[in-house]
């Protein structure tokens, strides 16, 4: 299986640069994952495809304003720091630019008398461990100084930080949003529950590795980045009881999918727990829990389009993507959605 087998041609103007004014106003391409049959709808029509007794799985991670701008003490050179993983109350693993000049001991000033940091370790992959110095609550300082870490294909800054988070975002820790969830509104989720569909929340903190390209030709030789997930007992019990009663498990987003598939056994029983997962789902994978997937349109040759292809098949998915291009759907993080069922 070759990486280039998952390529499709995408005109640059179809990459959405801004969220729609109303979250649920996006378009929805609905595909029968077995036959490949396609319907063109709007996201609010998702209700007509959900059934009483189903369970909708949502990832409640929250993106923090993790991009900081500062200057190197002594030289005044501009420095950009992207927070990846919190290690202690004051230290984080970070991506820094430019990295070569920031060796151990380098000090970065982000705001006089408010926030500074010292590089305490250089990792083999080029990331840095930075210990931050501040008075007060770090999250409040970050909210003042930080920018949302938008993907590289979005060239504008976001005027409203809340639009790069879902309406149910709760657990802080992501460097990127679980973007399929951006379409849900509180009102639409209330209608889901009124229909008799249960809602289960899992947490997977999305890392920037989700945007890293697959650099090997042989798909099976690609190594996934690791991300932290949490599944509590209540959620595991809800999903297991839904399956046992004949209901379907509908995941919103590839992150929700990867979370539940990471902690399910071969019998399809989901277990509670918290761990780091590097699960890589590509064609040939046997899904243990998920029965339906709501997702955005993903980059060509990405691990995410491979996951979607595993849930249907490569030919169906690429045909659907070509149809979405022809119909001028909006692509990627702030784009339209697809429902495979």
Image (tube, rainbow, N blue to C red):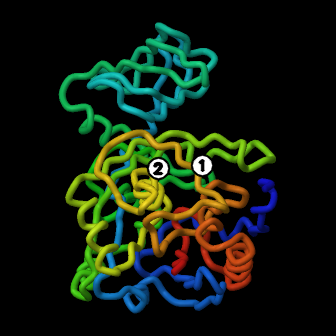
How many badges with numbers are in the image? 2
Q: CA distance from mark 2 to mark 1?
A: 9 Å
Give x and y (percent) for residue 321. Answer: 69, 75
Above or below, 340 relative to 200: below
Residue 93 vs residue 115: left or right?
right
Quadrant (top left/top right/bottom left/bottom right) for the N terminus:
bottom right
Q: Which mark is residue 211?
A: 1
Residue 295 shows in the view: yes
| Nearer the observer, 96 or 264 | 264
Which of marks 1 and 2 precedes in the sequence?
2
Q: Secondary structure at mark 1?
A: helix
- CB contact under 8 Å: marks 2 and 1: yes
Q: Which mark is residue 176?
A: 2
Q: Secondary structure at mark 2?
A: loop
Task: Please report the residue visible at 35 percent of the width from the left and 88 percent of the height from the top.
Answer: 51
Residue 255 shows in the view: no
């Amino acid at each position: 299986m070759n990486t280039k087998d998952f390529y499709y041609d995408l005109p640059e103007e179809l990459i959405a640069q801004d969220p729609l004014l109303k979250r649920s106003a996006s378009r929805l391409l609905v595909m029968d994952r077995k036959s490949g049959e396609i319907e063109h709808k709007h996201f609010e029509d998702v209700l007509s495809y959900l059934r009483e007794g189903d369970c909708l799985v949502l990832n409640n991670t929250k993106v923090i304003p993790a991009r900081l701008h500062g200057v190197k003490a002594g030289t005044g050179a501009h420095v950009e720091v992207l927070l990846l993983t919190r290690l202690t109350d004051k230290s984080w693993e970070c991506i820094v630019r430019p990295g070569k000049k920031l060796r151990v001991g380098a000090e970065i000033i982000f705001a006089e008398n408010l926030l500074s940091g010292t590089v305490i370790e250089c990792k083999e992959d080029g990331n840095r461990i930075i210990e931050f110095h501040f008075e007060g609550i770090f999250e409040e300082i970050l909210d003042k100084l930080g920018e949302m870490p938008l993907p590289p294909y979005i060239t504008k800054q976001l005027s409203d930080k809340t639009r790069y988070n879902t309406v149910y975002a709760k657990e802080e820790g992501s460097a990127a949003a679980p973007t399929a969830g951006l379409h849900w509104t509180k009102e639409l989720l209330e209608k889901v529950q009124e229909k008799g569909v249960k809602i289960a929340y899992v947490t997977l903190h999305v890392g920037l590795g989700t945007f890293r390209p697959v650099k090997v030709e042989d798909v099976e030789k690609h190594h996934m980045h690791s991300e932290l997930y949490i599944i509590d007992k209540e959620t595991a019990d809800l999903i297991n009881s839904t399956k046992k009663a004949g209901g379907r498990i509908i995941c919103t987003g590839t992150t929700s999918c990867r979370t539940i598939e990471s902690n399910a056994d071969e019998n399809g029983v989901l277990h509670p727990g918290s761990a780091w997962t590097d699960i890589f789902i590509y064609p040939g994978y046997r899904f243990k829990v998920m029965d339906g997937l709501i997702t955005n349109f993903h980059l060509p040759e990405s691990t995410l389009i491979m996951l979607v292809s595993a849930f249907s098949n490569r030919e169906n998915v690429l045909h659907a993507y070509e149809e979405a291009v022809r119909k001028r759907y909006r692509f990627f993080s702030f784009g339209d959605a697809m429902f495979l069922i």
